[in-house]
Image (tube, helix red, strand yellow):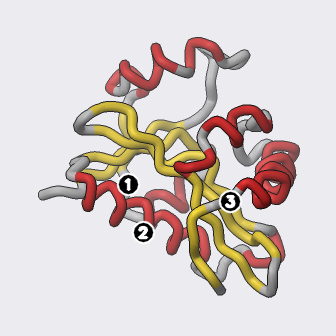
Amino acid sequence: MLYRKAKISDVESIHALITYHAGRGQMLARPRTMLYESLREFSIVEHQGLVIGAGALNIIWEDLAEIRALAVAPEYAGQGIGRSLVNMFIDEARELGIPRVFVLTYQQEFFEKCGFQVIAKEALPQKVWRECIHCPKFPNCEEIAMIKDILA
């Protein structure tokens, strides 16, 4: 398996992964425009020429980054691909000197296994007012906010 930064040619595969999971209520859908606009934040996992995992590290502020749009192809679930991507993003944030990484997720158990802790969404005002306010589910979002301190 190859872990690498995403390319333009990966956008449709990333979109298909996200759409698959969003259709099952496991994550929020993402429009293609968001994927193209934030492509440089994305990393993917490739196996035999296929994109089987993807996610992004989005810098929110000087002390905060978000892992978002994390998705793994269902036939590769449970093989450590999602956890490896999370670890990649945490390492990237650490290299950038960002002390905290958060997620908004429906997959609480997975992120707890990755060392994240549940927090109130109100503890993330930069995220809520920058992006969440534009979401059709705001303010009744059911995603769980979780955070991990990485520079201790």
Label pair 1/2, CB-CB below 8 angstroms: no
Q: What residue type is disc 3 on?
A: Lys
| Camera-side residue of 21 and 67 | 67
Locate residue 63 relative to residue 82 in the image: left or right.
left
| Camera-side residue of 41 and 150 | 41
Q: Secondary structure at mark 1?
A: loop
User: How far across and how far down the image is residue 116, in percent?
Assistant: 38, 54
Q: Is residue 102 above or below residue 9?
A: above
Name the residue located 60 percent from the left edge and 40 percent from the top edge: 38
User: How far across and how far down the image is residue 41, in percent?
Assistant: 53, 49
CA separation, marks 1 and 2? Answer: 12 Å
Q: Earlier in the sequence, mark 1 or mark 3?
A: 3
Label 2: few (<14), some or many (≥20) within 10 Å? Answer: few
Q: Earlier in the sequence, mark 1 or mark 2?
A: 2
Q: Is residue 31 above or below residue 6?
A: above
- The quadrant in which the C terminus is found is bottom left
Q: Is residue 55 above or below residue 33?
A: below
Q: Which residue is mark 2?
A: 87
Dividing the picture into quarters, in which one does residue 34 lie?
A: top right
Disc nearest the viewer among 1 and 3: 3
Name the residue located 55 percent from the left edge and 49 percent from the top edge: 40
CA separation, marks 1 and 3? Answer: 29 Å
Q: Earlier in the sequence, mark 3 or mark 2?
A: 3
Q: Which residue is mark 1?
A: 116
Name the residue located 62 percent from the left edge and 82 percent from the top edge: 2
